[in-house]
Image (cartoon, coloured by chain):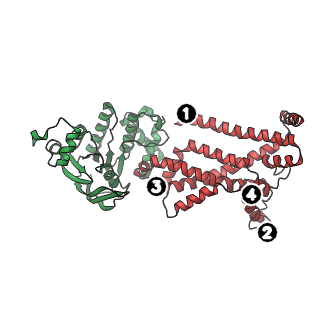
Chain colours: A red, B green
Amino acid sequence: MLQTLDDTFLRLATLDRDVLAIAWLSLRVSLSAVGIGLALGVPVGAFLAVAAFPGRGAVVGLLNAFMGLPPVIVGLVLYLLLSRSGPLGSLGLLFTPSAMVAAQAVLATPLIAALTRQVIADSEAHLGEQLRSLGLSAPRRALALIHDTRFSLVTTALAAFGRAISEIGAVLVVGGNIDGHTRTMTTAISLETQKGDLSLALALGVVLMGLVIAVNGAAALLRGYAVRAFG
Amino acid sequence: MPSLHLDDLSFCRNGTTILDGLTADIPAAGITALIGPNGAGKSITLRIIDGLIAPTRGRVRIVASAPVRRAFVFQRPALVRASALANVALALVPLRLNRAEREARARAALARVGLADRARDPATRFSGGEQQRLALARAWAVEPGLLLADEPTANLDPAVTELVEALLAEMAARGTKVVLVSHNLGQVMRLAADVLVLAKGRAVEHGPVRAILTAPQRPETRAYIAGELPWTSFAAVS
């Protein structure tokens, strides 16, 4: 046990190249997935908060349910789509970081859309009547509400980042955990634990925690600055 | 200026009747005040006129020679988390002006309400009085044909109240039809040309401001004014 901790600190102190490469890939994949999730999920959430149409309640309910999508199921469905015999097999994306981004984006998007809808619906309850009285169209009202809630949406993005970077099922299935190519923090921790290289697994765990804390800290600082500067 | 015709307006919510066949013809000229006790249906009437909610029965006819641009000033101003300038400019988006024109008009409106030097400040940090002045600037900027104001001076200090009243009077003088809901009968006397009294969702009395406030004919109006101005004795004037 003590030897394992010693080795862990040694790997961290010497900034093991493997650890850095894996950390960088994890960060790149998860941030890309959150970026895609924001681009898709925020407009969808805002639309659902502002628009009124038959069946909206059912769509919102389904979206909320999709927040709990099991990562391994998402991975499996994407695997079927991206495998050679699948409809998207010709893209050659299986076992690439792009497939991992796609998988995590599928997990992040409903979470972002559902949380955005809730945040914007709360803002709409306060501002909606005023915005409608200005004669603004539904898309313009949605834009104004996104602008109004932009600081709260940072928290939504962080929740999605947390879900993306901590999941293992989806990236393992579509990425394949290939050394130096698609190995992320979570897949590596799992593998190294099974192999018995606990010092590397622990070092990766410490770095993963550090990354999550650093990203959240940076976002909190940015949010605090923006709130002070822009209200 | 548009004239407004409220034809048999009814509005029910959650089984409660709020408007019950409200019928009134509101003249095109001057400021019309809607007065009456809480729950009489004044705010709902303003929202129906603005199209924010649909009546359960009846309709509103706005008669004018051209389409009427509307503006609404709420009792509690609702502002977006953005600068004062952006809040006013947002109201100008439906007018299809370019960005420079929107900003120029927004700045002029802010100057009119004495907030020119606060244009870049976050609107949500403004005091209550400043927020209402900003809401007035937003209405002023769109140069509406019809302004609906729902207790715009409730909870404001006398100086800001005076400014809001001056702005409403100026807008009316420049050709905006103003419909004002207010419990401040002094304000109603200062601003309004005519007064429509509502009680229990119906119009009970409508006439020139002085006649309504000094010699009300209906018991509902007398009871309301006596409640707002307890020192008034109608026995002496009627």
Q: Position of residue B59 (x, y in %)?
A: 30, 61
Who's the residue at 54% across and 44% down the image? Answer: A149
Amino acid type of the residue tagged 4 in the rendering: Val
Looking at the rendered image, the disc whose residue lies closer to the viewer, 3 or 2, is 2
Does the rendering let one see residue B97? no
Residue B12, labelled with which disc? Answer: none
Amino acid type of the residue tagged 2 in the rendering: Ser
Q: Residues within 10 Å of mark 4 (few under 14, many from 20)?
A: some
Q: In this figure, which residue is indicated by the disc labeled 2?
A: A85
Do badges 3 and 4 share one subunit? Answer: yes
Q: Chain of mark 2?
A: A
Q: Chain of mark 1?
A: A
For label 3, the SS is loop
Callout count: 4
Who's the residue at 31% across and 53% down the image? Answer: B45
Give the Cα separation between the discs numbered 1 and 2: 54 Å
Amino acid type of the residue tagged 3 in the rendering: Ser
Looking at the rendered image, the disc whose residue lies closer to the viewer, 3 or 1, is 1
Q: Residues within 10 Å of mark 2 (few under 14, many from 20)?
A: few
Looking at the rendered image, the disc whose residue lies closer to the viewer, 3 or 4, is 4
Looking at the rendered image, the disc whose residue lies closer to the viewer, 2 or 4, is 4
Compared with A157, A228 (above or below) is above
A69 displayed left or right of A55: right
Q: In this figure, which residue is indicated by the disc labeled 3?
A: A137
